[in-house]
Image (cartoon, rainbow, N blue to C red):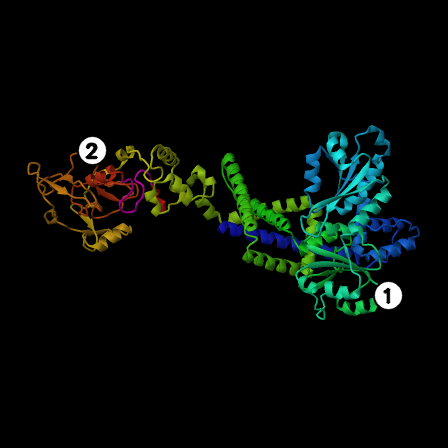
Amino acid sequence: MRSLWIQIVLLIIYLFLVFFVSRLLDMVLWYHNAIPSTQIVDPLLLSVRQLKQLLENRGVSYTGYVEKRELAQLVEASAQVVQSEVEELSENSESSDERLPTPPTPSRFRGRLHFYEEVEDTKDSVWLVQVVPADSQQHDAQMDDYSWRVVCNQVAPFAIRTGIFDCKLDRRLCQSKGWHQPLLLLALPKGSKAKDRVVLRTFTSMRPQPIMEWVRDQLSIRVKTVDSIHDLECEWLEEETCNSTTASNSLREVKVLLLTTLLHPPLFLAALSIKFTGRIKFGMFTVKKQDSDSLHKKLKHLDYRMPSYLVITPERKVIYGHRRFEHFNFDSMNRFLRAVQPEMNDVFLGSLIVVNMLVTLQIFQVSMQLWWKHLARCLWILISYNFWLFAVWLLILATYRFSAVNYFVDKCLVVVRTISLTELGCLLRTDWQTVSRYPYIFLSTFLMYSVLAIWLLKRHCAAEAEEESESDHPWWEVLPVDSYWINCFFRPMATLSRPLPPSELELEDGIEMLIERLAVPNLWLQPVIPNEYIKELPIWRFRGWESSPKQCSTVEVSCQSPQAIERLMDGEEQRISCTCSLDTVKFRQSSDKKSDRCSLLPYGLTEPCNCVDVISSKNGLCEDSGDESGSVPGGMLPTSECAVCLETYVWGSVLCGLPCGHSYHHCCIMLWLQQDNHHCPVCRWPTYKAKHLHRE
């Protein structure tokens, strides 16, 4: 979690740096040009070629207009011209050396299914399809390659997709549709709802100019015409004096209204009405002389000029084109409207970019010595982050119809829309447009920033990184499900009461336990533990925890008191030297008089263990003690009594230690382990697994 927050902070810092550098570049360009990008340019100062390019980008037909003044007036009637739009126009004309640039490659449909999949299933776009008849005698009447290329170039700026359907590939479809001669198909949504049914319009002329006029007329139908000033006030401007039900029903709608002297809307506005079907309402009002004065009074607070593109939201009204990079073409207004009324897919793509930027920052933090471990960890990070992103989005889409979720989404849209209509939102869109133009520069700078930021972070946290070095981690810790869930698969259920660090888990033990679990019926409850490790447990004679003879270790309180047991269970043993005589230790005598042994009944055991009576015996050793030494093994915790039988250690008793450091009577712990209790009675640490001392 801490690493995730570090990544988020680093990402925010990078985005802030991009914003700051962009503002510096804007100041440099403004100082160099000495002309603000939003300054209005007189169209008469432009060349005829520039005027025609502006009209083509806006989708306004200039057929019959020859004089430069006529073209300039037509440009002014469509929209005003700003300095940044002229600069962008000059850059595009310089970058294209060809007189007729290469259009996007048209799709070639392979048959009926491919045609239906591409054309009729995409309900938010427009298709222009050329139908080639199966009869070869009709080929002379069809469109030549040059004319088709001209048409594709003219419709490409408005996101109109093109394709070719050859009836030789599916004669039955052409016969059922009546496509027996060369023609053009225009596929577009029928209604005003999102994902509405697609209708096909046909056109038989094969000349580019009539084709463009036909496409413009068909798409202009989608822009609603406002007939009177009263309808404008009630249905679009939502004046308080209007009490109509239509005004109250459209309070939550986002609308774009063109106020102009043209009789037909530009093609870019009509194409946008198709793309934002069901999300934004588009309209056009042809301003007459008698309505101009009253319209100026209503919109004077918005710096209204003729013509204007009025964007109406439930929160406020703004005029499009007064800020930087708000040009009057399809791409620029599409970017603006997607920020004002984003679609779920737009938000998803934004979240996908942000998450993968976080993935990049996380990958640069991975430091593995072996290349395959490094690659495995990087792949896991990439897959896991994107998996959780998709899981969250699936949950959102599944619960979107609930009223609470829908209400929350609407409030988020209000926040996004409010920010988008401010100057800050305009600057963010400007930066996004710059990043979209030069993606490689953005990617390279982000990678350089990631390397530098992670390098500085690692230098600052060198000590912490050393603790998490690869030598202390098993191979599966390349997967960051490191602590609890991995242990659930590779540790017995009894040990889950105390979650352990993942580095305490050994590979061999974990894999062997997993195989043994699969071999028993009660799969996850009682795994079979091999008993070979018992032979390796340290055994020694108790001669005290210090070098002085006949000294034993005890605690300040009575060994039989509940406080002592409680402190022993918490691992708070204390070493306090005291003298005790052997005759003060009491044992329960067994019925076996021949061996004169004592029967100590361990706590929780059903069978007693037999030890030599230390009062009558000199060595006090169990007969099956094996090889034992007199010195205390390293890592043992000093304690005064056996936590199994609750009896105090006496001089010469045989003790057995566990990997956790706790010690017991050898006989007591052997009976404990033989009953399939493979963990320490005190701390529950597995008795078959070593424990690192530095973690105590």
Q: Nearer the viewer, residue 575 or 282?
A: 282
Residue 10 part of the magenta segment: no
Q: Secondary structure at mark 1?
A: helix
* Looking at the image, residue 412 lies above or below residue 212: below
Q: Which residues are magenta?
A: 677-690
* Residue under label 2: 626
Q: Nearer the viewer, residue 351 or 629?
A: 351
Residue 689 part of the magenta segment: yes
Where does residue 131 sit, x and y in percent of width and height? Answer: 78, 36
Q: As drawn, is 518 to the left or to the right of 480?
A: left
Q: As drawn, is 171 to the left or to the right of 446?
A: right
Where does residue 106 sit, x and y in percent of width and height? Answer: 75, 37
Mark in front: 1 vs 2? 1
Where does residue 597 sit, x and y in percent of width and height? Answer: 10, 39
Q: Can residue 440 be spotted in the picture?
A: yes
Where does residue 29 sit, x and y in percent of width and height? Answer: 75, 55
Residue type, mark 1 in image = Lys
* Residue under label 1: 289
Please identify the dominant SS of the magenta region.
loop
Residue depicted at x 70% and y 55%: 280
Residue depicted at x 47% and y 40%: 478
Q: As drawn, is 414 to the left or to the right of 309?
A: left
